[in-house]
Image (cartoon, rainbow, N blue to C red):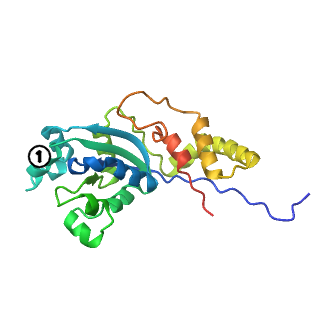
Amino acid sequence: MESDSPQKQMPAPRIFVERTLALIKPDAIQKTDEIEDIILQSGFTILQKRRLQLSPEQCSDFYVEHYGKLHFPHLTAFMSSGPVVALALARHQAIATWKAIMGPVSSIKARETHPDCLRARFGTCDLRNAVHGSESFSAAEREIRFMFPNFVLEPIPMGDAAKDYLSRYVSPTLLIGLTELSKKKPLDPFTWLADWLMNNNPNKPKISDGTEGPTPRKAFHGDFHLLLLRFRFSH
């Protein structure tokens, strides 16, 4: 028997995940909780979190692209003057979004043009500007590896590889979850589905008891988990 209304086909999920590194610099370390709240409210997932004290040599290696510039000695001295908090972040357009939240490099200029950005609120000058963010995709991969050498940084699937990854690993689990969702009919379907996917991830990782990682609710290790939480449907 034919239905009175045409059936709608569920569009295939698409991948919108990108990673970036955020650093809370020594001058803003007391504002870590406030900055982290802003990060989470902006739709980021915190993959890894680490508080550490960098040596001048480590700062030189991290900021190697600035080597030879006049501000380089001041930069390495400042960044090694106190603890920093490193955060590996993920979301759709993570790099551009985090750069927009940070604002212009100069905190003085930021207060004139982007008064609500982090550097306007928590920074004081070009050097002491509260936060750092990766400039590009390649920089993000390098910087995350630098700050989290033990973190397994799997490549994000792209193009045909992404479609194959989705069809093999994401879509089957997602279909089961959507079926359960239709049966349960929860008041908040998005949150219910997100929790269901977290609990039923076939590659669900074990959360270590180490001090470097964030709490289990914030730590989603592995790109399978990211893809499940960050899928989006076209309408």
Q: Tell me where residue 103 sits by quadrant.
A: bottom left
Q: Residues within 10 Å of mark 1 (few under 14, many from 20)?
A: some
- At horizontal 21% and vertical 50% (from top left) the residue drawn is 27
The answer to whether one can see residue 20 in this image is no
| Residue 187 percent across, percent down from the top left | 68, 52
| Residue 126 percent across, percent down from the top left | 17, 60
Position of 184 with respect to 160 (left or right) is right
The answer to whether one can see residue 108 in this image is yes
Question: Residue most toward the bottom?
Answer: 112
Position of 228 with respect to 177 (left or right) is left
Residue nearer the viewer, 67 or 132: 132
| Residue 36 percent across, percent down from the top left | 37, 49
| Badge count | 1
Residue tagged 1? 77
Mark 1 residue element: helix
- At horizontal 50% and vertical 31% (from top left) the residue drawn is 205
Residue nearer the viewer, 165 or 139: 139
- At horizontal 57% and vertical 55% (from top left) the residue drawn is 232
Three-letter code for the amino acid on which mark 1 is drawn: Ala
Q: Tell me where residue 49 sits by quadrant.
A: top left
Question: Residue most toward the top?
Answer: 209
Q: Quadrant of the N terminus?
A: bottom right
| Residue 185 percent across, percent down from the top left | 73, 50
Q: Quadrant of the C terminus?
A: bottom right
